[in-house]
Amino acid sequence: MTQPPGTSTGRAAARHFDPQTRVQFLQGVGPLRAQAYERLGIVTLEQLVRHYPREWLDASRFVAVKDLRPGELLTVVGEIKQAAALRTRGGRGDFSATVGDGTGVVPCYFFGQSFLARTLQPGVRVVVSGELDPVDHRMSNPMFEVIEGDLEQLLHAGRLVPVHALTKGVAARGLRTALRHALDEVADQVADPVPPEVAAAHRLVPLAQALRAIHFPESAEALAAARERLAFEELFQLQMVMELRRRVLAEEGKALALSTPGALAARVLGTLPFALTDDQRAAVADATGDLARPRPMHRIVIGDVGSGKTVVALLAAAHAIEAGHQVAFMAPTEVLARQHATSLARFATPAGIEVATLTGASTAAQRKLLQARLSSGEPLLVVGTHALLEDKVQMPTLALSIVDEQHRFGVKQRAVLAKKGVLPHVLVLTATPIPRTLQLAWFGDLDVSVIRSRPAGRGRLVTRVTGEEKFPQVVDFMAKELAAGRQAFVVVPAIEEGGKLEVRAAESEVERLRSHPLLRNFKIGLLHGRLKADEKLEVMRQFQANDVRVLVATTVIEVGIDVPNATLMVVENAERFGLTQLHQLRGRVGRGEHRSVCVFVGGRMLTAGGRERLEVMRTTDDGFALAEADLKLRGPGEMWGTRQSGLPRLKLANFWRDEALLMTARESARVVVGADPHLLEPVHAPLRRSLLAQYAEALELALAG
Ligand code: ADP
Ligand code: MG
């Protein structure tokens, strides 16, 4: 942001403050403390007033000292009677004072704050908020404020007290004081990203008022209105990003319409040993419909584990290949790429579609050959990992990119893939049942096909929840399954993915099983994040061939692995996983015709709440319901790896609670983009600037120029 030089530098005395003024110029901050603020991401006054509280303590109930009751946050107004700095035997400097108001006296004790002796001297009038300890009848470390003027101006006690994220060098009281100054100086000047027409339509509280009230609310109602206003602003901007991206896709209508008679897809259908489910058929129709239009497809297929997304992708690929184009199928890991290649080939090869693979494990000779074929424009279906993204891989006739498990790919990689082809149709597959609010919020720029029904004819799948002490019974059962020819997975949580601890946890589990008398005759394999690509492939190959009978793995097997002969899934320390993850793990079994069992073993530290959460797994088989429960319990961050999504974290908005607000925000974004698709009208300048500041990468194309 450009500023005339004089505004943000120079002497503090005759300072003119604006939102871009650096915090160091605030009274009581200074250059040294400004460095501490910077650790909180705060450089300017605007960033300071945008540093919202994490919570608010309601210390707004005033009582007489004689009416103080233990266990409640209450406030008294009085005078310091006695005061003393003390030194404990351990050498800590504490401070003790009594506060009286004519009805009684309450002792207050401040641990490690002997410096308070300077301010809280006898005779000083104070407001003190705290909880009376039921045992020693005093307040420990109460919130307090010295009264100089008007009670209205309280910041630290006797009100809804804001609790902000702090850091070393930025204490709560100092931050609140700085905020008070900053709000007084610049709240009215902060540019509002919400256009006036939107604010008016939804009768939003003015921005300046919301900023003041979010930090220093006068009442619970004022706080709620401020929170809603600022949460709306976040959601609205996120939806603006989605709408703008959508518009780019619609406008850049350079995609070739891949409309074919569908003979190749029909041949694939003919080779399938099963009929498509209704949802699969609908998803195929959606995708082929998109491909036939002269604008790039941007669709996500959301289908629970085992719902049969691969076939849907293959049928879409068949249309592109029939039209003479190349298709790239991207998988997040080596193992999955191989497996996809195999399962695609099962139905593709008989129909005359060649499936090639390109991964980190491909030899130099294989690479060279394949790259030559791709460069020549030969219509091929290539399955691969990140290796496909390398510059030297040319795909001049790439028409369709299929991306498995999108959230593991950044926005950037998707863009690289899109750029390789002249016609970036993109089909994303995900096994994570994304709740509707998240679909809108984070994939609002994509069209969505949902596969809810599962193919019929699968064996029954039973879920059990148990504790570590039942390990012998679990092994008993495992031995029986193995003796009957079946296979088992044992999953241990990765404490730190790819780290030493992960390997150690997995290895000790292997040792425990190998040394068990009942399991001595069965080969046990190990799969973890530290293995080399070819080692992983070898273990998987042996497991797929039923040579390895038990596969001990960290969460690397989480997505996509298909071994229908595996009928037992044991998850150790199951409480460490999210419900969605557990559901995906469970989906690894029950894929063949045999009855399957999934056992979630709680660790020794399992709490009652943790147990209850696992019980939900036992009673619910609906991935969407579990995803919603996860969202409610843990928030979207855990599930989605917010960082990878390429979108900034929302500070106040909550997808679960704010669904209605999200819908309003979405509608508003549509109206704004419809009226001013490039945000060029002057009235939208603050919005444009705010979006570019936060979402530069995501909006690279949408707001260029
Ligand atoms: P996911 O959606 O988890 O990727 P897959 O595509 O791997 O699921 O399909 C799981 C298994 O179900 C595969 O073996 C696949 O061949 C099979 N399958 C797919 N569609 C059907 C169907 N309509 N009826 C029966 N089996 C199917
Ligand atoms: Mg799959």
Image: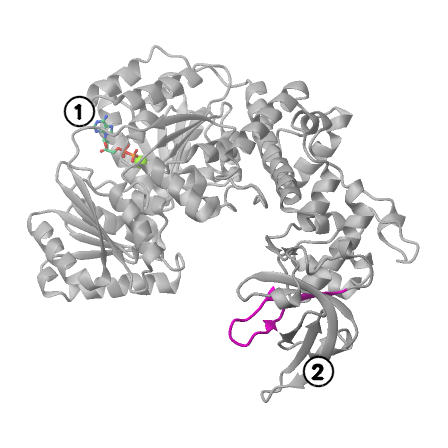
* Mark 2 burial class by Cα count in 10 Å: few <14, some 14-19, many 20+: some
Q: Is residue 71 above or below residue 584?
A: below
Residue at (30% x, 46% y) in the render: 616
> The residue tagged with tag 1: helix, strand or loop?
loop
User: Mark 1 vs ligand 1: CB under 8 Å?
Assistant: yes
Q: Nearer the viewer, mark 1 or mark 2?
A: 2
Tell which residue pokes out farthest to the right in this image: 14
Q: Is residue 391 visible?
A: no
Q: Does 135 lie within the magenta span?
A: yes
Image quadrant where residue 606 sits = bottom left
Residue of label 1: 273
**Which quadrant would the C terminus be assigned to in this image?**
top right
Q: Quadrant holding ligand 1?
A: top left
The residue stretch that appears in magenta = 130-146
Residue for badge 2: 84
Residue 252: image location, x then y, percent: 58, 20
Q: Which residue is depicted at the point 57% across and 28% down?
A: 664
> x%, y% of residue 60?
65, 55
